Image (cartoon, helix red, strand yellow):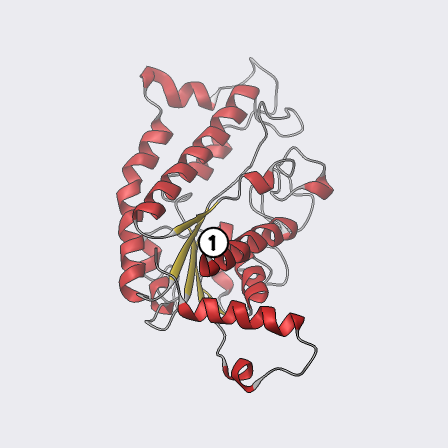
Amino acid sequence: MKTTLRLALATALSTLALSATTPATAASTATEPLRYVALGDSYAATPLVPPADPTSPACLRSQAGYPRIAAEALGAALTNVSCSGATVDHLSTSQYPGTSRQYDALTPATDLVSITIGGNDTGLFTQALNCVNILPQPYGTSCAQQNTAGGTDKIKARIDAWAPAFAKVLDEIGEQAPHAKVFVVGYGNYVRPDGCHPAQPFWQQDANYLQGAINHLGAVLKKTAEEHGAAFVDTYTLGVGHDICADPADRYIEGLVPTSAGTPLHPNAAGARAIGQALATAAHVTSTG
């Protein structure tokens, strides 16, 4: 697993700066900040959480998303090109007129890369809307039953079929930013076991099915990351007790009807802070391990 020397030096110097009682040395002031590039979809872009990033309005990117939180914790210089609705194709092609390819942000001087991708490619979160049932059973249709009819789980099969495309993404990042440490950030904990119908309109079996599909995507992201020399940042554990069924003040993920600034089924400001801190911690541990 690659270790970025610049990351190790920056972390060490930051620690010294915090503990020192004398002015910073010439060596510390001369150290350049980490060059950090954030790639990905709306999970990273954190749409509708203020303040908005004015550099690419179509991407609905927030300046309070997890990349910014991690960058501030690491003292890194951030280039955030994540974009709402992105798929792996948008890493190599322009997503909107005037929007550059996300890969264009990578250079041989890049020290750290984070990426969250796959939810749009696999149709996972579009599928979440198909799981909504306002009325109790049996007045509706179970998405779990529909997607597993015939003995094959259609969503999990779609995720498995997509995995090679993600492997190519990691290879491409490695080619364009050969000295960077890459962190794959998972999608995390959306809904607790058995859900909380009718507060969140997913029947028990559908809540379990939906989170199971998200977990399966996470497992594929983790396995692929490890096979390609990247690190996986688990956001499931930190989200326990902070899912869409939690009290509004405790949520990291907004429900179908948001109760704070944010987009349904996406991180809010509190969630972005938690994820960003987890990413920064992972980067620190990797650099010193």
Residue farthest to the bottom?
26
Looking at the image, residue 245 sits to the left or right of residue 221; the answer is: right
Task: Inspect this view and state whether residue 145 appears.
Answer: yes
**Kind of residue indicated by mark 1:** Ser
Number of numbered callouts drawn: 1
For image coordinates 40% across by 49% down, the residue present is 117
Along the line of sight, which residue is nearer the eye, 21 or 260?
A: 21
Reply above or below: 52 against 119.
below
Foreground: 27 or 46? 27
Going 66% across and 70% down the picture, which residue do you hit?
19
Q: Is residue 87 above or below residue 2?
A: above
- The kind of secondary structure element at disc 1 is loop
The quarter of the picture where the N terminus appears is bottom left
User: Which residue is tagged 1?
Assistant: 84
Residue 149: % across, % down: 36, 17
Left or right relative to 60: residue 148: left
User: Which residue is more in the foreground, 26 or 178?
Assistant: 26
